[in-house]
Amino acid sequence: MSSWTLVPLAQPPKLDRDRLYIFAGTADRLVLPDQALALAKHWQVPIQWYQGAHLTFRNEAVVRGHIEAAMQRAGWPVSAQVGAAPQEDWS
């Protein structure tokens, strides 16, 4: 069995800086604030902070706006459903 470790701070990003985005939750316990700060420093980009945890970003308007802006700058279509929780069909 082979294994590898991804270490984003060990190499330069493959995308141009204007296509790099970081959003981070102040209560995230999986990706700690220090890790987001280190990546932002390495990439030389700002962080969009939100008051939430790792899995709560979908409920954060500031994060949805951040994602929508990134999609628009990339020329991707932006749907009203960006960041919305998926709808389950229980029928």
Image (cartoon, grey):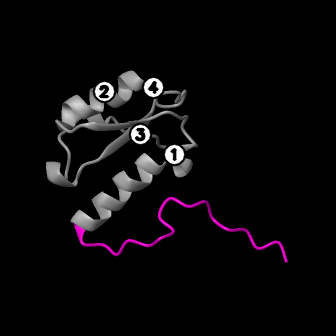
Residue that mark 1 sits on: 57
Closer to viewer: mark 1 or mark 3:
1
Q: Would you place residue 66 above or below residue 33 in this image?
A: below
Q: Is residue 24 left or right of residue 71?
A: right
- At x 82%, y 72%, the residue is 90
Closer to viewer: mark 2 or mark 3:
2
Q: Is residue 34 left or right of residue 91?
A: left
Q: N-terminal of the two: label 4 or label 3?
A: 3
Cα distance between the residues tagged 2 and 3? 24 Å
SS class, disc 3: loop
Residue 17 among those drawn in magenta: no
Mark 2 neighbour density, 10 Å: few (under 14) some (14–19) many (20 or more): some
Closer to viewer: mark 4 or mark 1:
1
Mark 1 neighbour density, 10 Å: few (under 14) some (14–19) many (20 or more): many
Q: Say which amino acid is labelled 2.
A: Leu
Residue that mark 4 sits on: 32
Q: N-terminal of the two: label 2 or label 4?
A: 4
Q: N-terminal of the two: label 4 or label 1?
A: 4
Q: Nearer the viewer, residue 12 or 43?
A: 43
Residue 37 is labelled as 2
Cα distance between the residues tagged 4 and 1? 14 Å
Q: Position of residue 4 (x, y in %)?
A: 41, 39
Q: Is there a contact, CB below 8 Å, between mark 1 and mark 2?
A: no
Cα distance between the residues tagged 2 and 4? 9 Å
Residue 77 among those drawn in magenta: yes
- At x 41%, y 25%, the residue is 33
Residue that mark 3 sits on: 4
SS class, disc 4: loop
